[in-house]
């Protein structure tokens, strides 16, 4: 039992008080406690961060407060939640409804799926306003517009009549926030509000929440696993682990001197930009991947005859190479063509130009002819959950490439699977489980094991750690580096997280709109960025240090949004690279400006 | 007895399931539009209501020459078409030429084969039907190429109805939708698929007829539903009769006791055996089949709505042989006969049947009886058109149960049961002689009998003998003669015979009267 | 490092082939009931001659009342007699054969065909999809009965022909639905992965796509049972397919439906059997889907 | 999007053309000879030959088809062999009734089916759900003839709420629509149930609840529209299912639609009418599919941008 926290004199009364909150979920093996005796107070204007690895019960806490625990699986098994003077745990659904959004509001991790795709932004916002009687029916649209202005949405008038799919992820999250703040709630719960967004967009959204909080004096319960975000946003932090409160401290204290072993480990695992160890410059070994003037265009068909009317120029005239044992990082904002390059290497999308894998030209190869090449190059996809077949045991999936290539059969396969599992640090007795029975980190290990099963020379790792917790992320990164050290693997490491890249990359390629903006050795690019775009990416990375404020985002000049879609026959202007030094090239247009 | 002096006035509603195909007298040839056309059109000849007795209709008088070849008709005075024009002799000529004109594609053209000049005109040559001569406005003279006792019946057929040329030409192919005749009723309204309304024709040539002011035909009603309507007082007569499914229910219901009418019908249900296909080319096999079938049980199975038959003609038809005993039901003897004919173990064959209740059931009963004597008959239950098509091929259908397509006489004359269905002329591809029976000798006797003009009794005898002799060859197994059972609401009445009129099926619209009329 | 959270529901019980699936099915009362019904029907179909209380073809003399009406259930005839005085119970038992062949086999073929076309079109896209789906549209707009009639007129009617017609007609809706679903599945990452490891289309289609489509296939498959059993009756009526006196549930209903106010048992019992069959497959199907979907383990 | 719809229109026209061809060929293969049907039972062989000649039945298939097609493009579907009336006028006089019935049956089945599906999904795995699902199987399995007569007997004869068959007023329309719609209602309830369950598990429902919306509003405004999307595509498929039902239902209720026409034509091999009815039903199905294509973007804005 943890005692009520000492609120101290002069502190404002807490708006939200949670005492000994426990939540149980029903599982096959009986009731399981996923939240155990959580207590905290939240005061007006304060930001409390709930940090902890995946599955630690952060979302359960939020849902319990909102009264939205998934029924009938989960239920509050003990404790109290008080909002002002109202006890929430015993509230009937009818009364609870009046509280949601009006007094406690919540924004969710996935802005893509959290909005109703069939309703305009205006209707979705007005709905809240009207439901809680915040404004009259005739006033609602006006108020909705105001709200959109408040969340700094560009062209708010137009946005009102748009549908969610017409908005970018960042815009959608702004709409979510507008909706959450519509009735001016006392408490705002933000459950991983930026995890699904680009770094730059994340920085903007975090800024916005901070500003709004300051304006309205809202209390914010911020749920995140990103210590950078914690450092940037929180006043106080609660570290959760397996449903238990591991440590509670003001943010500076926690970062300065974590009291528990777990918090210390968590903080140690956070990649910090600029803190990565030096990487030895690899010898100029053999080029395993040589890409020359690679372009990928997707046709957009239309018209009565279904002819191609436009093309997405996803990748445009990109050239690079990867040497044996080297890690080449590919960074850039969402949609800039990173994944597409990876897919082109494996022949998963039609492309033009030249790609050589270990000397073999792959241009013009059919699927079948690509097969031998695939033994040398494999890919690990972004979402480990989505890239495993939910209906097949992981053991079968891990050795499936060997079956496909006819490399092994029978008991040989079982042996091989065990061996692969051991290599990625999983216990062989898990081989007969299904993907949903693993954690995210474990699943990513399984995907890596699958990629390794053909003993490739190159692995394309597409956002392979973005979906993982910091601690797990660190493990997976370690594993990848270990494999590289052992087998001399090369990686094409695709990521938008600069801090991660700094840890693993030998060389970095910065991409934008399908073209390379800057390219060079890791230190050259990350420590001495020459292109404004690179700089912007770098400055958006949250700093996991509450004592240091992240610098404001630089001016967006020269990086405004441009669509990669062009009518047939046209294309983007080719960007020429100039060589700054032997291992550092940058787009010429940027040079002109600096 | 039909009450000619029944009061006029009132209305009635008759229900039908199928839509009316056409009301063009040259084309309509199903039992549903047959009686409607009879009420809309008149020919030179007609029948006494409720009977099979011929009478003059539009003809005032009628003479036949000594040799039976020249028939002279005199038209009544002041008879009108529905369009108000008086009927003249030219209309008779036009009408007969129209129905026999190949371009009309009338299914009844063949009936007029005895008229002189038919063959050339019907083949599309010449300038009209030379046998029909207009003497003056009131007189028309029809010359036959051979004496034919059925001629007056033919002139009473719907096909011989008198139609006004101008109306036909105006409507063209749509004359069947906009009929103009001289019958007791005229068509007032026709909403396809829903209803037709007949209204009294005020200028009808028979005074006091029709009795009703109007007759409404409600179309598209399932017989079961039609019955519900009648029970509910929304309709008066189920045109399709009492549905087999509800038959017992209705018959056993005391409420309907007075309203059910039973009557004979000029109909025979029979099985044809293809005499050109083995093993039915063996007369003993055919006889054995005749003895194998338990007609009483079949009749029981259809709730006694029929009487067992032993010869082609129905009992109410002149020429029916009361004395003839036919082949008695005796499976033992049948088996023996089969064995003697060389089929001790029976044989396998097919029985074609139209797929509308109760025909498949009857076929199954037949099948069981045949199994009894070792004959395995596989049933092929098909749509009407397919059965007819199979029957018209020399080598397709070994056996056909005629139910649903069974022969209903066009006119009450024994000859009508011979030509197309038992004569050599019908035994051609596409013909209706599905047993492919062709006995030249009998064919000759049939022609002779038809030429026996004048002596009715002798002619009847001749035909009687013909059918008895045909049964000797046993091309058919006659099964039963259907009885008509119908129902009418207490809103309408009339002599029972009107409700089972042998030529106006299902009812004689012209003479039924409303109980409410005075 | 031990920080990796223990996955939920850590049991290591595993599926092992059909026997285990069957055991799991039997553990669920609803599914067990469905299995029981199906087993009973299959048993009835196979051993029909042994369990029929009377000769299903015999038009016995005392099977009709004096007026020629059928006898209601009771007495010598447990489920009554039909219009020809035959024992209804025996006819229903024998009819199980036809109806199972149609409702389960022919419908099954239709489902497979539909799933096959839909999945192929959905996965390959492009021209393959264009041709297959336009053909599907054509088949959908084409009146099935017409096809049946023409076949009836051309071929000797037989159970095979009905089965064929039903398979040819009933795959269409299936194929539409599966096509749409496959299209969205094919975009999913685990299918991309398959391409990236060099799996051939057959493997992707059958090992990876098909299991995910199972739930739609089951829904349509079970819905199809009733419709095909009734369609068989229509076709028999038109002269394609089983001819009298061979019984099937559908044609027993069809022959007697006009009599249902006077002899309701002739419609009620076969109707009940059709509903039971469809329901049984639905119950088993639902359970099967849950069992085969590992993510649903432990939830009911 | 307009381009897409235009293309669908074009494709639909091609499909219809394909259907004319297939139907024509199939009917050509039917052994029953139309000329014999017309000629009647007392006709001579010459008469039959003469009729064949007049109708051009002796011409090669291609010639006959071409003649039909050119006629069709001029709005001429030929004349019924048996009724002699123009097929187009036969159909025109009956089509409105069938369309009315079909549309109202679709509305009925959607109302019944979707309601049941929604209720079952909201009461998932409870007795209500099980009962409703069994009922939906009964609806799918019950012969429409029997349902029709039962409804007539109870609601028209016994209770007298509706007329006993016929056409004209709204009261006439109710029972046939229900009879025809029940089958589809069974289907839709199953589809809607699973679709609803899927949407209920989506994030957007959680958001809606977090907004403090009432349950009714969540279900009607958020869950149902999303759940209906996959079902819209079914409507085209649905019309195909109706075609056989319409024959039975129209006959039971004396509804003056094309079902009756079709049935009689089939029984008597009246080829021009069969062709006509086939074309009408194919057009209805194709239009149903097109309609689904048109309606989907109205409900789902995401489709517009494709
Ligand atoms: N519907 C459910 N049924 C059973 N267990 C559940 C359910 N939802 C969540 N859990 C379990 O509850 C625990 C806490 O989950 P919760 O979603 O709160 O974690 P989290 O800290 O938010 O993780 P993440 O960072 O991945 O969102 C986990 O062990 C999870 O497996
Ligand atoms: N199959 C496709 N058809 C059409 N356009 C596509 C297709 N795949 C990708 N694109 C487009 O190509 C561009 C590059 O996509 P890509 O997935 O390579 O981006 P990315 O850099 O990997 O982004 P993210 O960080 O979001 O994964 C995007 O504009 C995307 O919309
Ligand atoms: Mg969470
Ligand atoms: Mg990507």
Image (tube, grey):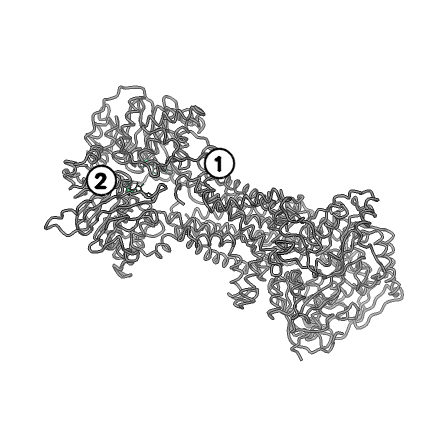
- Where does ligand 2 appear, by image quarter? top left
Cα–Cα span, label 1 and label 2: 64 Å
Which residue matches tag 2? Answer: A557
Q: Is residue A163 left or right of residue A149?
A: right
Q: Where, by quadrant of the figure, is residue A293 drawn?
A: top left
Residue D32 drawn at (x, y percent): 69, 49
Which residue matches tag 1? Answer: C18
Task: Please tell me whether mark 2 sits on a helix, a strand or a loop.
Answer: loop
Q: Is residue B44 left or right of residue A166?
A: right
Residue A192 drawn at (x, y percent): 26, 43
Tag count: 2
Neighbour tally class for label 2: few under 14, some 14-19, many 20 plus, Cα within 10 Å: few
Q: Where, by quadrant of the figure, is residue B490 drawn?
A: bottom right
Quadrant of the rendering where the N terminus of chain B is positioned:
bottom right
Q: Chain of mark 2?
A: A
Which of the labelled discs sits on residue A405, or is there none? Answer: none
Residue C90 drawn at (x, y percent): 63, 49
Q: Nearer the viewer, mark 1 or mark 2?
A: 1
Task: Please tell me whether mark 1 sits on a helix, a strand or a loop.
Answer: helix
Name the residue at the left extreme: A9
Q: Where, by quadrant of the figure, is residue B260 drawn?
A: bottom right
């Amino acid at each position: 039992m943890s005692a009520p926290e000492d609120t101290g004199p002069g502190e404002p009364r807490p708006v939200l008080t949670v005492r000994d909150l426990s939540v149980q979920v029903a599982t096959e093996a009986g009731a399981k406690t996923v939240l155990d005796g959580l207590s905290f107070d939240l005061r007006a204007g304060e930001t409390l961060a709930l940090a902890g690895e995946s599955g630690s019960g952060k979302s359960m806490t939020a849902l319990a407060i909102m009264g939205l625990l998934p029924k009938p699986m989960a239920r509050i098994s003990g404790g109290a939640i008080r909002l002002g003077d109202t006890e929430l745990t015993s509230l009937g659904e009818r009364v609870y409804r009046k509280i949601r959004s009006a007094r406690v509001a919540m924004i969710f991790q996935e802005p893509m799926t959290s909005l109703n795709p069939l309703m305009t932004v205006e209707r979705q916002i007005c709905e809240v306003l009207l439901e809680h009687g915040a404004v009259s029916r005739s006033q609602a649209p006006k108020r909705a517009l105001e709200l959109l202005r408040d969340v700094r949405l560009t062209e708010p008038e137009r946005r009102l009549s748009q549908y969610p799919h017409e908005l970018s992820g960042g815009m959608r999250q702004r709409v979510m926030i507008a909706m959450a703040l519509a009735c001016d709630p006392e408490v705002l719960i933000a459950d991983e509000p930026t995890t699904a967004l680009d770094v730059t967009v994340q920085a903007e959204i975090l800024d916005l929440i901070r500003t709004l909080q300051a304006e309205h004096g809202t209390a914010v319960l911020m749920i995140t696993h990103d210590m950078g975000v914690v450092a940037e946003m929180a006043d106080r932090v609660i570290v959760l682990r397996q449903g238990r409160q591991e440590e509670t401290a003001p943010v500076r204290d926690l970062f300065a001197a974590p009291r528990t072993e777990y918090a210390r480990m968590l903080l140690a695992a956070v990649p910090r930009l600029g803190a990565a160890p030096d990487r030895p410059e690899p010898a100029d070994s053999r080029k395993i991947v040589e890409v020359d003037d690679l372009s990928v265009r997707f046709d957009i068909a239309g018209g009565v005859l279904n002819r191609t009317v436009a093309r997405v120029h996803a990748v445009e005239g990109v050239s690079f190479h990867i040497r044996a044992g080297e890690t080449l990082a590919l960074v850039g904002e969402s949609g800039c063509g990173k994944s597409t390059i990876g897919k082109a290497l494996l022949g998963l999308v039609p492309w033009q130009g030249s790609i050589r894998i270990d000397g073999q030209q792959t241009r013009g190869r059919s699927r079948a002819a690509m097969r031998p090449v695939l033994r040398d190059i494999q890919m690990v996809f972004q979402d480990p959950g989505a890239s495993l077949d939910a209906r097949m045991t992981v053991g079968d999936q891990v050795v499936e490439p060997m079956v496909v290539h006819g490399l092994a059969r029978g008991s040989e396969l079982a042996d091989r699977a065990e061996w692969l599992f051991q290599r990625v640090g999983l216990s062989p007795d898990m081989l007969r489980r299904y993907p949903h029975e693993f954690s995210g980190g474990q699943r990513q290990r399984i995907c890596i094991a699958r990629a390794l099963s053909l003993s490739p020379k190159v692995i394309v790792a597409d956002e392979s750690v973005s979906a993982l917790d910091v601690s797990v992320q660190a493990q997976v990164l370690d594993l990848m580096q270990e494999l590289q050290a052992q087998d001399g693997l090369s990686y094409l490491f695709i990521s938008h997280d600069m801090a991660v890249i700094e840890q693993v990359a030998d060389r970095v390629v910065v991409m934008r709109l399908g073209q390379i903006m800057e390219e060079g050795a890791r230190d050259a690019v990350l420590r001495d960025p020459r292109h404004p775009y690179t700089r912007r990416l770098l400055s958006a990375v949250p700093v996991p240090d509450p004592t240091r404020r992240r610098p404001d985002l630089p001016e967006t000049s020269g990086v405004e949004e441009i669509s990669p879609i062009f009518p047939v026959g046209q294309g983007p202007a080719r960007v020429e690279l100039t060589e700054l030094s032997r291992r550092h090239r940058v787009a010429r247009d940027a040079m002109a400006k600096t | 007895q039909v009450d000619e002096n029944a009061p006029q006035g009132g209305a009635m509603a008759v229900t039908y399931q199928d839509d009316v195909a056409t009301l063009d007298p040259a084309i309509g040839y199903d039992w549903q539009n047959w009686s409607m056309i009879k009420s809309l059109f008149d020919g030179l000849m007609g029948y006494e209501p409720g009977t099979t007795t011929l009478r003059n209709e539009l003809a005032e008088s009628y003479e036949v020459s000594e040799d039976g070849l020249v028939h002279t008709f005199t038209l009544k005075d002041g008879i009108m078409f529905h369009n108000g024009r008086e009927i003249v002799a030219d209309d008779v000529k036009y009408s007969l030429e129209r129905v026999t004109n190949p371009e009309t594609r009338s299914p009844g053209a063949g009936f007029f084969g005895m008229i002189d000049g038919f063959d050339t005109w019907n083949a599309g040559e010449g300038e009209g039907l030379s046998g029909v001569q207009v003497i003056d406005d009131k007189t028309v003279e029809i010359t036959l190429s051979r004496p034919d006792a059925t001629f007056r019946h033919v002139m009473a057929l719907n096909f011989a109805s008198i139609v006004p040329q101008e109306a036909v030409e105006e409507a063209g192919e749509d004359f069947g939708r906009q009929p103009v005749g001289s019958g007791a009723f005229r068509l007032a309204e026709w909403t396809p698929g829903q209803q037709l309304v007949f209204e009294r024709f005020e200028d009808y040539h028979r005074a006091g007829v029709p009795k009703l002011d109007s007759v409404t035909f409600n179309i598209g009603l399932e017989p079961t539903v039609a019955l519900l309507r009648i029970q509910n007082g929304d309709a008066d007569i189920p045109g399709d009769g009492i549905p087999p499914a509800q038959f017992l229910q209705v018959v056993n219901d005391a409420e309907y006791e007075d309203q059910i009418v039973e009557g004979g019908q000029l109909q025979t249900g029979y099985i044809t055996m293809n005499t050109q296909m083995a093993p039915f080319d063996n007369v003993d096999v055919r006889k054995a089949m005749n003895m194998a079938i338990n007609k009483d049980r079949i009749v029981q199975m259809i709730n006694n709505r029929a009487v067992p038959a032993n010869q082609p003609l129905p009992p109410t038809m002149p020429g029916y042989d009361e004395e003839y005993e036919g082949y008695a039901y005796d499976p033992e003897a049948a088996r023996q006969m089969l064995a003697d004919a060389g089929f001790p173990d029976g044989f396998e064959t097919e029985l074609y049947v139209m797929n509308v209740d109760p025909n498949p059931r009857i076929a199954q009963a037949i099948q069981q009886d045949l199994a009894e004597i070792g004959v395995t008959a596989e049933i092929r239950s098909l749509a009407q058109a397919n059965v007819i098509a199979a029957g018209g091929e020399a080598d397709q259908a070994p056996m056909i149960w005629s139910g649903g397509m069974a022969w209903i006489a066009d006119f009450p004359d024994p000859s009508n049961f011979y030509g197309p269905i038992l004569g050599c002329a019908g035994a051609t591809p596409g013909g209706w002689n599905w047993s492919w029976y062709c006995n030249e000798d009998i064919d000759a006797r049939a022609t002779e009998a038809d030429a026996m003009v004048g002596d009715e009794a002798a002619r009847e005898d001749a035909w009687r003998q013909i059918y008895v002799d045909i049964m000797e060859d046993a091309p058919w197994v006659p099964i039963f003669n259907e009885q008509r059972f119908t129902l009418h609401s207490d809103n309408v009445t009339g002599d029972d015979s009107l409700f089972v009129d042998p030529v106006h099926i299902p009812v004689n619209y012209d003479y039924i009267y409303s109980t409410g009329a005075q | 490092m031990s920080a990796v959270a223990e996955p939920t529901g850590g049991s290591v019980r595993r599926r092992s082939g059909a026997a285990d699936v069957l055991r799991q099915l039997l553990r669920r009362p609803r599914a067990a009931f469905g299995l029981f019904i199906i087993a009973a029907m299959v048993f009835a179909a196979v051993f029909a001659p042994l369990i029929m209380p009377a000769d299903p073809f015999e038009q016995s003399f005392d099977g009709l009342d004096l007026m020629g009406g059928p006898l209601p259930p009771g007495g010598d005839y447990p489920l009554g007699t039909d219009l020809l005085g035959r024992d209804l119970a025996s006819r229903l038992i024998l009819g199980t054969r036809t109806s199972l062949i149609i409702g389960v086999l022919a419908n099954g073929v239709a489902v497979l065909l539909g799933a096959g076309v839909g999945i192929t079109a959905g996965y390959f896209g492009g021209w393959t999809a264009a041709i297959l789906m336009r053909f599907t549209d054509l088949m959908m707009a084409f009146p099935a009965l017409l096809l049946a009639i023409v076949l009836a007129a051309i071929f000797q009617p037989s159970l095979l022909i009905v089965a064929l017609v039903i398979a040819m007609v009933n795959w269409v809706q299936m194929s539409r639905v599966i096509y749409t679903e496959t299209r969205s599945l094919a975009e999913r990452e685990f299918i991309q992965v398959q391409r990236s490891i060099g799996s051939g289309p057959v493997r992707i289609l059958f090992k990876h796509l098909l299991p995910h489509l199972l739930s739609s296939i089951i829904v349509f498959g079970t819905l199809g049972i009733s419709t095909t059993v009734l369609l068989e009756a229509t076709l028999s009526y038109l002269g394609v397919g089983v001819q009298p006196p061979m019984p099937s549930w559908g044609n027993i209903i069809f022959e007697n439906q006009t009599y249902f106010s006077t002899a309701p048992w002739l419609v009620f019992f076969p109707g009940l059997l059709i509903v039971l069959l469809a329901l049984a497959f639905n119950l088993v199907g639902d359970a099967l889907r849950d069992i085969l979907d590992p993510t649903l383990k432990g939830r009911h | 999007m307009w381009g897409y719809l235009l293309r669908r229109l074009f494709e639909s026209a091609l499909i219809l053309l394909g259907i004319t061809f297939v139907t024509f060929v199939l009917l050509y293969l039917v052994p029953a000879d139309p000329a014999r049907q017309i000629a009647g039972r007392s006709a001579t062989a010459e008469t039959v030959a003469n009729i064949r000649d007049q109708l051009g039945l002796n011409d090669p298939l291609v010639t006959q088809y071409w003649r039909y097609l050119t006629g069709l493009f001029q709005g001429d579907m030929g004349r019924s062999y048996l009724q002699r009336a123009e097929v187009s006028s036969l159909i025109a006089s009956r089509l409105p009734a069938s369309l009315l019935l079909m549309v109202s049956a679709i509305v009925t089945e959607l109302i019944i089916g979707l309601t049941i599906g929604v209720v079952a999904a909201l009461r998932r795995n409870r007795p209500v759900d099980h009962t409703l699902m069994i009922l939906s199987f009964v609806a799918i399995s019950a012969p429409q003839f029997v349902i029709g007569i039962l409804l007539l007997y109870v609601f028209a004869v016994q209770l007298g709420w509706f007329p006993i068959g016929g056409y004209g007023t709204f009261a006439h329309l109710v029972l046939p629509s229900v009879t025809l719609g029940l089958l589809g209602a069974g289907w839709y309830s199953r589809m809607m149930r699973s679709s609803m369950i899927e949407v209920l598990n989506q994030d957007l429902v959680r958001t809606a609840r977090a907004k403090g919306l009432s349950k009714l509003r969540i279900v009607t405004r958020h869950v149902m529209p999303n759940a209906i999307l996959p079902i819209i595509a079914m409507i085209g498929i649905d019309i195909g299912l109706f075609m056989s039902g319409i024959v039975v239902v129209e006959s039971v209720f004396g509804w003056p639609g094309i079902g009756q026409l079709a049935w009689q034509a089939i029984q008597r091999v009246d080829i021009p009418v069969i062709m006509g009815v086939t074309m009408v039903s194919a057009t209805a199905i194709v239009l149903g599919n097109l309609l689904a294509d048109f309606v989907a973007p109205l409900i789902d804005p995401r489709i517009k941008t494709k």
